[in-house]
Image (tube, rainbow, N blue to C red):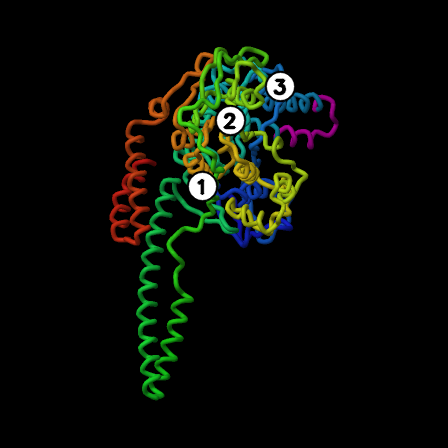
Amino acid sequence: MIKATNLSYGFAQKDLYEKISFTLEEGRHCALIGSNGSGKTTLAELIHSPENYLFDGTLIRENVGRIGYVTQFASRDKKQSMTVLDYLLLDFQTLQQEITDVCAQMESAENLDDLLEHYQQLLDEQDAIDGDNCEVNIRRQLQLAELEDKADLKLSLLSGGEYKLLQVIRQMLRRPGLLIMDEPDVFLDFENLNGLRDLINHYRGTLLIVTHSRYLLNHCFDQIWHLENGDLQEFDGSFHEYTFSLLQRKIELQEAAAAGFAEIERAEKLVERLRKEATEVIDPLKGRALKGKVSYLERQKARQIKPPFVEIQRPYICFPKVAPIEDGSVLLQVDDCSLTFEKPLLEHVTFSLHAGQKVAIVGSNGTGKTSLLRKIYTNRDPSIQYSENAVTGFFSQLQEESLCDAHTIQQEFAQVGLENESDLAKYLSHYCFSPLGLGRKISQLSGGEKNLLQLAKLALSEKNLLLLDEPSSHLDTFAQMSLEDAISSYQGAVLMVSHDFYTITNCMDSVLFVENGTLRPMSIRAFRKMIYKHHFSKDYVELETRKKDLETRIARYLEKGDTDKAKILAKELEPIVAAMN
C-alpha cells in the first residue's frame, strides 16, 4: 500500500530523514513512535500529501484510494447547535444530496454520458461507505467509543476529549484506504482513551498513528515504526515484542562489546611485550611482528562495537533545588471553592497542599480541572490562600501562553536571563536540543519540543510550588519518564492536572478525584486499584508487575556487565511478553 525507498527530507536548519525506507501493507495497524522533534508529524503529513513536500527518494502509494487524516488539534464552534448524530450524518447527507442533484439534471440533459458516469461514481462511493446503513454504523461506533448516550447531545455540550473521539469516528465512517492519526490521544481522559483503544482495535482498515501513549502502545498495533536520529526502524509485531527485542539487542551489544574489549586488551599486552623485546634486542623479525600486531590492534579498535545501549534520546529534566520548608507546613489552602462556566462545574472544593507534597487532580474531560488550576494560579478568590513562603510556577497546556511563536529559541530564553549563546546551548543540550537549532522559531517546533522548552524555562526559576497542567502531553515516552523522575526528585510541592495514568502513579503522592462535582482525596494505591479494576484484567496486572520486575533486574545486571544472568532473566521474560499481546 505504502512503500518508501531512500527517502530524505529536512528543513533549512535541520535534516529529518536520511535515506529511510519503509513499507505499510494493507490492513496493518502501525504506530509511529520516536523522540520529540524527530519528524513524526512531518512524515505523517508527507505520506498524506507528498505533493506538498520536496523530498529525495521515492514514495509509492498503490491502491490506497482516499486517505483520511485526524490532526492532533481539533477546533470547533462552541455555539454549534448541531447534535452528535446530525454531525456524523453530514457526510452521508451531502453525498445523498449530490446523487439527488445528478438525478434531477439527468431529467433535462441532452447528453447523459458524463452525468451517468458521475452518477455511477457517486453510487460506488455511497456503497463503499455503506451509506444505506449509515445510522446503524454511526450508533455502533458511538457504542464502541462509550458515547452512545451522547447521540442527541449538542456538540457545544461535549468535552474536548469527546469531540476528539468524534473526529476519529467521522474519519472511520468514511472508510478511507488509509487513515492517518496524529496523536489522537492527547488530553483524553482515561474513559475516552479506552474508547479510542476500542475504536482502533475494531477498525478493519489500515492505520498509521503517531502516538506517545504508553496505554495505547501496550494495547493496540501490530507494527511499529521507530523514527530516531534521521533513521527509521520497522518492526513487525506488538510494542511489547518491540521493547523486548530492543532489550535482547542491548544484551547482545554488551556481550559483543565485552568480547571486543577482551580481544583488544590481549592485543595491547602482546604489543607491549613485542615493543619491550624489540627495544632490548635489535631483531628485524620482531620489528615486523610488532608492526603487524599494531596494525591488527588499530583495525580491532575501528571495528569495535560501541558501548551497550540503544541510542535513544532521553532529555534530562531537573527542577530547581528549593530552600527547605518546615515539613508539614501548608503552602496552599483551598476552602469551599466553587467553579462555574456556563453551568456549575465544581462546588465545595476544599483541600490543602503541604510542603514537598505531590498531588494530582484527576477526572473526566470537561469537569473543570484545568479551570480550577488556573483559578488557583491567578489567586483571585478569597477561598484560595497561599502561605507567605509559597513561590509558584505554572506550566500551561496552552503553549502560546508561555512561548511566543515569532521568537527564536534563543530569544525566548534571553527573556528569562539566559542570554549567553554557549551557556544556552549547554543548558538545552540536556533537553535534546542541538546548538545548531537555537535560531529556529518556536512556530517551527513540534508540540513535544515546545513542552520541553516550557519545562526548561520552569526549571530555571526558583519555585517551591509547581502548578502543572498536562505537562506530559505531546512528550515522547522517554521524555515522559524523565519528567516523572524530575517530579519524584523535586523537593518542592506539585499540584498537577493529568490524564496520564502512568505519570500519575509513578510520581504522585495522592490524588484529588473529581466526583459528584467536587474533589475527593484518594491515595495512589486506591487510584491504581480503581483504574486496574475497570480497565485491566487481573492477569494483565500480574503480568505487568512481573515484567517490570524482570526488566529492572536485567537493567541492574547489565550495569554490572553480567550478561550471562541478564540472558537468563530475558528467557524468563519472553513468555510473559508473549502472554501480554
Q: Which mark is residue 502?
A: none
Q: Who is closer to the viewer here, 44 or 547?
A: 547
* Of pointers 1 and 3, the one earlier in the residue sequence: 3
Q: Residue 202: horizontal and vertical position, in percent?
A: 43, 29
User: Can residue 183 be seen in this snapshot?
Assistant: no
User: Could you say whether the residue bearing mark 1 is in a helix, strand or loop?
Assistant: helix
Dominant secondary-structure state across the stretch colored magenta? helix
State how far apart marks 2 and 3 are (Cα).
Answer: 37 Å
Looking at the rendered image, the disc whose residue lies closer to the viewer, 1 or 2, is: 2
Identify which residue is drawn at 31% across, 72% down.
269
Q: Residues within 10 Å of mark 3 (few under 14, many from 20)?
A: few
Residue bearing mark 2: 390
Amino acid on which disc 1 is placed: Phe
* Position of 563 relative to 163 (above/below): below
Residue bearing mark 3: 78
Residue bearing mark 1: 478
Q: Residues within 10 Å of mark 1 (few under 14, many from 20)?
A: some
